[in-house]
Image (tube, rainbow, N blue to C red):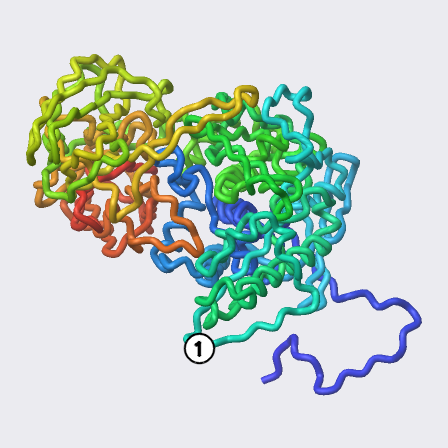
């Protein structure tokens, strides 16, 4: 049967003296997003799920931008590889869903599999029209401050698209739409005087962050020769750090193969790419043919990036521009919509050819808020600016630029666009306080986290219910059943304490010789931070040689409000700590890593880093508590915070409860159309997307199998293979009941059952 769009077997057209136009297709939608990196992708999914029509335009064959298989940079954000003090700081919402799904399918870190995860998430949304291999080339304006349409061209199907919408979002990285539309932008580093940023860079750290290209090697088990191309760098000593090259390091671990910081990173990208290719092939020639690496004989060059990973080009101006002080001082914003926590990470302008270290990183003591006003143009009324073109100074950009921070912020664009369409508003209008509260509410409803904000959701029926549980954790002990830990470095236990007297605690140590044990009780100077920078009490114990010595810690201190404290056992190589295999939501063990000591004049604080060893290491201390630690109540499921902050913020069942269950009861029957559950997928785990592997595919705290029952005991929903943070159950017909029961049948690991949040809506 001949299809309607099938061309004849032979097509003949006469000569035309006029220029033939390409095939042109008009697409109308509510929101056009140009750029399919993680920011544009998350904005598109968020908007589509909120009910509006989205056209997503990506000039590459895959989604993901720098996280895709074309560049292969691991996606990171506030967790910073778990190497800073930002505990439970993995980004939430859609990007969390993507990361958790990638972990489930791809814990080995295969960039090709990550491509499929992203693509699947987009094509599953009926409200998204996806145009791959399609480059936006022209902007049309209806007036000086309003975009009318965007013209894009797909080289693969030789089709031109005319894209019309009331709202546009530029998430293209270089700002192709915002630039053509005339929006105000910046390129390069501001002076110290403009914003009072003490870390404003010198000439050496100069103008822009450069591009990088990665390569992968592979051992094929037999000798492989390498003949370098003629354009390969032939003098490896031009790279001051050439002696650090080795056969075991490749991929984005060589992020410092960087170039372009003194060039135009928009218009000279091809020039920069060629220089990076020269470097990469010169490096491989050095590894293969210098004679310095005999172990490289059987290695082959498996993959080299075809396009560079860009760090910085244009930054566009919003109604607010983030600066260094927003990051370091953790400034508060009424319009906060997400958070960041990467270091202020600036690189030498000469990149790989610089004598300086590859980066200069300075951290804040905790995460910082990202305000919504950075996500739209201050000049173009219907234009959102997402991704790395968001409104930030060069110094603040050194932190905000990382992919997960940008993806989390871009989710606000998708949700704000839906609010604009639904209420006939423009992006700037959403920044008004009454609209902002609704935006923040809706972002938190779907798993977004905004520091210092609680989900104030009056229509969540759980808030009007009586919430009880079959049991709750009263933490009396963490059993002494784990490995022994040599105290070469200090080791600490984070504990969520309630207001009042610090409980007496008991730890167990082995001493190789008579020695002194030093233990400190610390807390953070800011309530929701997790930097142990305030010492409340220090205890010292003279110990004889011997094993299994039980030490009672009576700090005799009062806590003025619920918060995390740190029981820090200080370094002593003669001692070994007894650890526990028990893991509990909201509890973490830490190890002293290093101390940040910045120069005195750059506006950054000095403090210690205490970080969790990655699983399967990172065991809690074996401890006993008198009285037990509370704070794991059932009512936590509606306290408005769905991750540990100053408290665990979770209902946690007693480990011995054979059938953990939450009961939600109303005085009169309710009509329930939707239930949202939020589980513990370990927000402290960084979940790097590529190259780095992970010990588990599913987080050991997550509820894997659960049932929801109504007041009559009938099962209305059952999920047997959950691995996600947010589970949403929508009923075909509203459920009329005066009670819901959540039965936890199985947790993935050995941790007791835990639930962060339950939401019920009519």
Instruction: Report the residue at 32% width, 48% height from top.
Output: 729
Horizontal side, residue 592 vs residue 633: left or right: right
| One can see residue 419 in this view | no
Q: Relative to 464, is 139 above or below?
A: below
Residue 583 image point, x, y percent: 20, 41
Residue 226: x %, y % from top left: 57, 72
Check the image and report above or below for 359 versus 502: below
Location of residue 84 by image quarter:
top left
Q: Secondary structure at mark 1?
A: loop
> Mark 1 = which residue?
222
Front residue of 479/90: it is: 479
* Residue 686 percent across, percent down from the top left: 38, 44
Task: Give the percent coordinates (x, y) of residue 600.
Answer: 53, 20
On the rendered structure, is 552 left or right of 676?
A: left
The residue located at (49%, 28%) in the rendering is 336
Question: Is 218 or 103 nearer to us in this picture?
Answer: 218
């Amino acid at each position: 049967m001949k299809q309607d769009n099938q061309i004849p077997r032979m097509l003949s057209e006469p000569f035309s003296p006029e220029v033939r136009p390409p095939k042109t297709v008009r697409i109308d939608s509510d929101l056009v997003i140009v750029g399919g990196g993680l920011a544009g992708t998350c904005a598109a999914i968020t908007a589509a799920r909120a009910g509006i029509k989205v056209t997503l335009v990506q000039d590459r064959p895959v989604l993901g931008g720098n996280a895709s298989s074309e560049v292969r940079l691991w996606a990171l954000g506030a967790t910073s590889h778990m190497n800073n003090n930002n505990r439970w700081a993995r980004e939430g919402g859609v990007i969390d869903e993507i990361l958790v799904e990638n972990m489930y399918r791809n814990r080995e870190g295969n960039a090709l599999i990550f491509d499929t995860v992203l693509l699947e998430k987009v094509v599953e949304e009926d409200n998204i029209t996806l145009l791959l291999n399609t480059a936006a080339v022209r902007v049309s304006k209806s007036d000086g401050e309003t975009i009318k349409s965007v013209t894009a061209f797909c080289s693969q199907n030789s089709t031109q698209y005319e894209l019309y919408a009331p709202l546009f979002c530029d998430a293209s990285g270089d700002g192709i739409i915002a630039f053509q539309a005339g929006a105000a932008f910046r390129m390069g580093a501001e002076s110290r005087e403009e914003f009072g940023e003490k870390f404003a860079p010198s000439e050496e750290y100069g103008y822009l962050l450069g591009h990088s290209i990665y390569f992968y090697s592979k051992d094929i088990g037999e000798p492989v020769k390498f003949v370098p191309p003629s354009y390969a760098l032939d003098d490896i000593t031009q790279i001051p750090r050439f002696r650090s090259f080795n056969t075991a390091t490749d991929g984005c671990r060589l992020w410092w193969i960087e170039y372009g910081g003194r060039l135009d990173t928009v218009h000279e990208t091809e020039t920069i790419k060629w220089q990076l290719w020269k470097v990469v092939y010169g490096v491989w020639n050095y590894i293969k043919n210098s004679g310095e690496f005999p172990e490289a004989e059987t290695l082959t060059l498996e993959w080299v990036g075809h396009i560079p990973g860009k760090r910085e080009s244009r930054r566009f101006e919003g109604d607010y521009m983030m600066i260094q002080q927003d990051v370091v001082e953790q400034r508060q914003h009424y319009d906060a919509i997400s958070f960041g926590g990467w270091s202020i990470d600036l690189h030498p302008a000469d990149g790989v050819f610089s004598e300086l270290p590859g980066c200069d990183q300075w951290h804040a003591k905790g995460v910082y808020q990202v305000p919504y006003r950075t996500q739209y143009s201050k000049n173009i009324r219907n234009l959102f600016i997402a991704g790395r073109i968001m409104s930030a100074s060069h110094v603040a950009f050194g932190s905000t630029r990382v992919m997960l921070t940008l993806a989390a912020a871009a989710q606000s664009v998708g949700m704000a666009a839906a609010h604009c369409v639904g209420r006939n508003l423009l992006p700037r209008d959403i920044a008004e306080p009454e609209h902002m509260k609704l935006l923040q509410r809706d972002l938190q409803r779907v798993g977004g986290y905004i520091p210092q904000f609680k989900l104030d959701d009056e229509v969540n029926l759980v808030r009007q219910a009586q919430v009880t549980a079959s049991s709750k954790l009263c933490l009396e002990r963490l059993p002494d059943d784990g490995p022994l830990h040599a105290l070469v470095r200090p080791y600490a236990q984070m504990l969520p304490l309630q207001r009042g007297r610090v409980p007496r605690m008991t730890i167990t140590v082995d001493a190789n010789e008579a020695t002194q044990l030093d233990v400190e009780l610390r807390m953070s100077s800011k309530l929701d931070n997790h930097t142990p920078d305030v010492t409340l009490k220090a205890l010292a114990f003279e110990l004889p040689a011997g094993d299994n010595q039980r030490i009672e810690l009576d700090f005799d201190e009062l806590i003025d409000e619920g918060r995390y404290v740190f029981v820090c056992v200080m370094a002593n190589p003669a001692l070994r700590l007894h650890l526990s295999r028990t893991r509990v939501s909201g509890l973490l063990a830490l190890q002293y890593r290093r101390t940040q000591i910045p120069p005195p004049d750059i506006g950054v604080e000095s403090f210690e880093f205490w970080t969790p060893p990655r699983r399967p290491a990172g065991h809690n201390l074996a401890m006993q508590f008198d009285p037990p630690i509370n704070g794991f109540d059932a009512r936590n499921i509606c306290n408005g915070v769905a991750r540990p902050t100053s408290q665990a913020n979770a209902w946690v069942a007693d480990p011995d409860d054979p059938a953990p269950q939450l009961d939600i009861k109303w005085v009169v029957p309710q009509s329930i159309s939707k239930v949202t559950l939020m589980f513990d997928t370990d927000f402290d785990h960084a979940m790097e997307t590529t190259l780095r592997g992970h010990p588990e595919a599913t987080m050991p705290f997550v509820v894997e199998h659960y049932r929801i029952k109504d007041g009559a005991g009938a099962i209305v929903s059952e999920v047997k293979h959950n691995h996600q943070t947010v589970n949403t159950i929508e009923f075909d017909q509203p459920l009329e009941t005066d009670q819901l029961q959540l039965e936890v049948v199985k947790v993935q690991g050995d941790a007791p059952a835990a639930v962060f949040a339950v939401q019920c809506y009519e």
